[in-house]
Image (cartoon, helix red, strand yellow):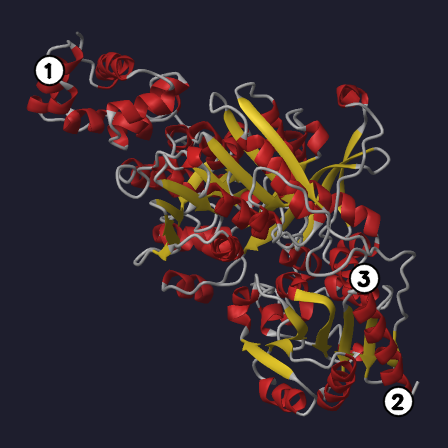
Amino acid sequence: MNREEALEALRKSFEAGLFLNHRRLVCLALNEPYEYLADILKCYDELNPKDKTLLLVSESRREGFLSSIERSGRYMVSPLEFRDIDEALGGTYDVLLLDLAERFSANDLGKLVEVVRGGGLVLLTTPPLKEFYSFITGFHERLVRTPYTINDLRRNFEKRFLRKLTSHKAIWVLDEDKGLMGSEYIPARVDRSAVRYVRCDIPDAIVGMAATQDQVDVLVSFSNLLKDSWSRRRVFLVMANRGRGKSAVLGLMLASLTVRREFRRFDRIYVTAPTINNVLTLFEFLRKGLEALGQRFREVEDESLSLTVRGLTIQYIKPFELMTKSVDVVFVDEAAGIPLEVLYAIVDKAKFSVFASTIHGYEGAGRGFYLRFRSRLRGDPSIRLVEMNMKKPIRYSDGDPVESWLYDVLMLNAEPASLPFKPEELPGIGLKYEKLDTERLFQDDKLLSDFIGIYVTAHYRNEPDDLLILGDSPGHYARALTTEDGLILVALHIADEGSLPDEEIKLIAEGYAPPGNLIPSVAVKYYTPFSEFAKLRGFRIVRIATHPSLFRRGLGSKALRMLEEEASELGLDWVGAGFGASYEVLSFWIKNGYIPVHLSPVRNPSSGEYSTVVLKPLTEKASKFIKEMNWEFRLRLVNSLQDPYYHMPARVCRLLLTPYPSDYKLKPRLTESQLVRLKGYAERGLLYESCRDAFSELVKAHFLSSGQGRLGLDKASEELLAAKCLQGKPWMTVGNELGMTSMEVKQACRGLAYKLLKYYVNVEQ
């Protein structure tokens, strides 16, 4: 096919896309794409003769691309550097030009392709196909860590990416040697149904702004929930794939509340999401809704995102900050990116809460969030729950071939396999531990979907780059616990780490952040006297997740034991993991014998969680290092809970203070005066405040002791000691957290003082 024939084939495809309100994708696999790019843009401009928006994401070749665009028609260009691509989210463009030859990132692809409207073009530039498995970008370089080199990249993701480029309809590849490859997409039917607007308690001005029937239906259901009594907490849950207009409809819902009499008694409504960028569209449609209602509003200065209307302030707030607020009405967008503990706290606090999240999309984790969160809400009789699903795309029509390709290539719609047996039949099912060959995994779509689908239903916030890392990064492997016939029940993504040379250890100690080697880097950075640990070898568990139908049946623990056996047979020194320190996840690791050795000094800005590292030694050498690191970690933590970790839940504090399993009893350093005051408090004479200094030293001694040397206390007692004596929380706050009255907390604290004194100082009452 010559140049003219190729352009004519593309012209017909673009014309069909414009008619169907579908997008088209062209991959320019050319060393010098500028001339072909100009011809393609001219062709599209002739078919779509209006001013068009073009998003250009490139750096080193930007000038060449701009030159091609300038002579190709009516295009208003928005150039972006790769580090700024999040600025494009929420926007809509006619054309995307993404230079994958400069940075080949699956995250970039997942975020940017979906900003193109129906009838638009997605243009990707890559090296020629013959160079596809050897080209190197800066992103590729970050996939390689010591002791590997760039030549060890496996390119499984690229192989699958190319296979999907050439197998989907309306996805075209223009190659240096092979010319144009691809075929046109003709849908079986075309949906031309109009939106049916319905009268309801929400003003017509708001309902009339809905762009799809799904949005209208959501507004109607929302209005019905508003009629319910305030005697029960009300929760509205909206789930959708990306690009269905859920954030926009949340903004319209919020605007409608400002004219309802029963909401005028509130002075503030909070809006939250993992990041402030996640709520930009919500606030945009909130403003549009207020304008449609004729409501005057004022943007509040000196706040990140906030406006006031009729005395009501609508304000964005970080998720974890809501934990300390008194709230009545809360709107939550991209809820899957927020820890479940925070979401449960919002439900418990708020009289009226709205949650929306993505089921499938680059944000990830939506399906797992939906299953677990919905189950909790449905099981609470004090909650009136309404659920809605939005399916119709808002930027383009149903059946868009580019969306189909994107979801396939990035596994955005992966689901775990259906079980051929009932969960209660599990004890009779034969199980095996399988080392999955990564190349075979990326060649078998069903197997890969089963594997990735389990993560989607777990607690992980998955990203497309996770798939790329598993496929390409040397030293990353897939493991699974399967049935005898290969059905995946537990999926594990692991990475080998360690064996760092002296030069790299020295650089890390001086502040260098290497790619990979997360756990050895933590050891060097925070426990410099034990830097030799970085020379040991181990497996870091990047992800482990169980089939959603088989939670809490011991499968995850069984898979861990089998992985540990493999690591021991390979002569590795340790197995470890790093994750957000939620109570549920941390409990799993502690239960399986993993020892906490690190907690990040600041929260993750999106999840609000602190990242923690846990380790399990497999050799005597590793045991010595981990014992020392755990001691140093607990020493730091007991002296830090009152400041950087003040808001951390007490039950998480208790788990983090889990000691290395050795017998050690620490005698507290107390002066004679401190002992007298402590004894006076324990005998119910003095107030807690009169001996807080001494009591905290006593509690520190308890948490720094271990094994037979630590006094056996129940969980609630240790949580009370952590919250009151180490974090310094008020009596009422401790009581609310532990489900006790302030008086019960005070009485329990006094009794614990006596027990600790008797055990650690041998003082009798």
Q: Say what secondary structure mark 3 lies in.
A: helix
Question: Could you tell whether 487 is left or right of 389 in the image?
Answer: right
| x and y percentages locating residue 500 in the rendered image | 51, 59
| x and y percentages locating residue 635 in the rendered image | 30, 38
Q: Residue at x 76, y 20 (%)?
A: 427
Q: Residue at x 69, y 87 (%)?
A: 73
Query: What is the quadrant of the N terminus in the image?
Result: bottom right
- In which image quadrant can residue 661 be found? top left
Three-letter code, disc 2: Glu
First in sequence, mark 2 or 3: give its number: 2
Q: Say what secondary structure mark 2 lies in.
A: helix
Three-letter code, disc 3: Pro
Q: Residue at x 60, y 69 (%)?
A: 139
Q: Residue at x 61, y 87 (%)?
A: 66
Asked if the residues shown at circle 2 and circle 1 are in contact, with their CB atoms under 8 angstroms apart, the answer is no
- In which image quadrant can residue 160 be found? bottom right
- Label 1 sits on residue: 686
Can residue 610 be seen here? no
Three-letter code, disc 1: Leu
Residue 688 drawn above or below residue 412: above
Which is nearer the eye, 84 or 303?
A: 303
- Label 2 sits on residue: 4
Q: CA distance from mark 2 to mark 3?
A: 24 Å
Q: Residue furthest left?
A: 673
Question: Could you tell whether 86 is left or right of 683 in the image?
Answer: right
Which mark is nearer the camera, 1 or 3? 3
Question: Could you tell whether 226 is left or right of 26 in the image?
Answer: left
Which mark is nearer the camera, 2 or 1? 2
Residue 586 drawn above or below residue 296: above
